[in-house]
Image (cartoon, helix red, strand yellow):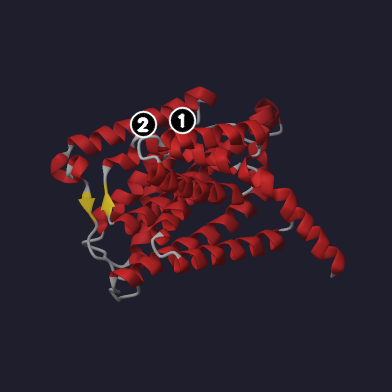
């Protein structure tokens, strides 16, 4: 599938999300959360290309969200808050990445989990600063100098999330096609051979790890704006588990997978909780089990042949 086709599909998906949010207003919040988590899961996709899984990537969601909450009273402008929050997550990813790059596979994943849980404990214990489990209420923010109504702000946050998702998705697509991105697959299969060719595997993986922290940071920023409440649960292991769940559900073969999986996950959770309040986790587990058994490539793996067939048909008729 060409980049042009993927970009057009992404635009169509964004337009469909806006249409659904307009037709069913209460889904606007759910879809905003889905797009935010999709950005974070795109970072996990980069690591999966290298054969690594982070079970603690919620750390960067929380870093960015808390940076937004702490800075909002001082810098209320969203256009300034976004780069600052993303920078906080990226800088943390660089520091952590320099440490975890020495490990692979289960050790890599569990170290990320341990660091995330350490941060979660700090958020709970330092009540005077973080307000513990009560969390921090996000101060009013402005958009290009204006403070819109709540309804308008919700629409702006969704549109901002979709714009970020499109931009970052295109960047990740280009990155994966670059020599640095293609070297990630070599880390998964033949890391020693990559080193023999003179390509530093740790540097390649570190670059992907820092980029994944940036993506999670952008997602955390959107989550903070959408929920207007930042709590330590963002750094808890269950949040990291959600991101890995979404990565498996959506599939890691394309940047479409994380967003498709995130939307499916959030919609399934909402409707499952509505019809089976005490058993929605079981329903999610059954959905994941079915995907693993019958669609190992995830939801995108199921839809990709249809998209490619349509692309070939349009190319043949043009």
Measure the C-alpha gap from mark 2 to mark 1: 10 Å
Give the mark nearest the N terminus, 2 or 1: 1
Which quarter of the rendering shows the C terminus? Answer: bottom right
Which residue carries the number 2 mark? 115
Q: Are marks 2 and 1 in contact (CB under 8 Å)?
A: yes
What secondary structure is found at the residue carrying circle 2? helix
Q: Position of residue 34 (x, y in %)?
A: 46, 52
- Of 276 and 180, nearer the camera is 276
Residue 64, horizontal then vertical, whole percent:
35, 50
Q: Say which mark, if any, is on residue 249.
A: none
> What mark, if any, has residue 100 been given in the picture?
1
Residue 82 makes an appearance in the image: yes
Q: Is residue 276 above or below residue 3?
A: above
Disc nearest the viewer among 2 and 1? 2
- Judge the density around disc 2: few (<14), some (14-19), many (≥20) Cα neighbours within 10 Å: some
**Closer to us: 226 or 50:** 226
Which quadrant holds the N terminus? bottom right
């Amino acid at each position: 599938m060409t980049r042009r086709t993927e970009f057009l599909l992404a635009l169509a998906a964004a337009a469909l999300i806006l249409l659904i949010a307009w037709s069913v207003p209460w889904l606007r919040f759910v879809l905003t959360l889905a797009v935010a988590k999709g950005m974070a899961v795109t970072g996990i996709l980069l690591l999966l290309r290298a054969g690594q899984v982070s079970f603690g990537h919620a750390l960067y969601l929380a870093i960015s969200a808390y940076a937004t909450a702490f800075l909002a009273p001082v810098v209320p402008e969203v256009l300034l808050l976004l780069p600052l929050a993303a920078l906080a997550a990226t800088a943390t990813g660089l520091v952590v990445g320099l440490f975890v790059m020495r490990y692979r596979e289960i050790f890599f994943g569990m170290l990320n989990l341990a660091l995330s849980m350490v941060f979660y404990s700090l958020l709970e214990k330092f009540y005077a600063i973080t307000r513990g489990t009560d969390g921090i209420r996000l101060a009013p923010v402005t958009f290009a100098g204006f403070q819109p109504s709540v309804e308008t702000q919700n629409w702006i946050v969704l549109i901002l999330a979709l714009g970020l998702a499109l931009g970052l998705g295109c960047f990740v697509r280009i990155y994966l096609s670059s020599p640095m991105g293609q070297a990630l697959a070599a880390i998964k299969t033949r890391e020693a051979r990559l080193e023999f060719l003179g390509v530093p595997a740790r540097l390649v993986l570190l670059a992907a790890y820092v980029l994944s922290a940036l993506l999670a940071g952008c997602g955390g920023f959107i989550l903070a704006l959408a929920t207007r409440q930042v709590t330590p649960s963002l750094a808890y292991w269950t949040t990291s588990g959600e991101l890995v769940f979404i990565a498996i559900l959506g599939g890691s073969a394309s940047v479409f997978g994380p967003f498709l999986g995130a939307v499916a996950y959030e919609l399934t959770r909402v409707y499952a909780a509505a019809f089976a309040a005490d058993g929605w986790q079981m329903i999610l587990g059954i959905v994941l089990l079915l995907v693993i058994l019958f669609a190992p490539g995830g939801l995108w793996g199921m839809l990709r042949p249809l998209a490619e067939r349509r692309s070939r048909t349009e190319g043949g008729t043009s």
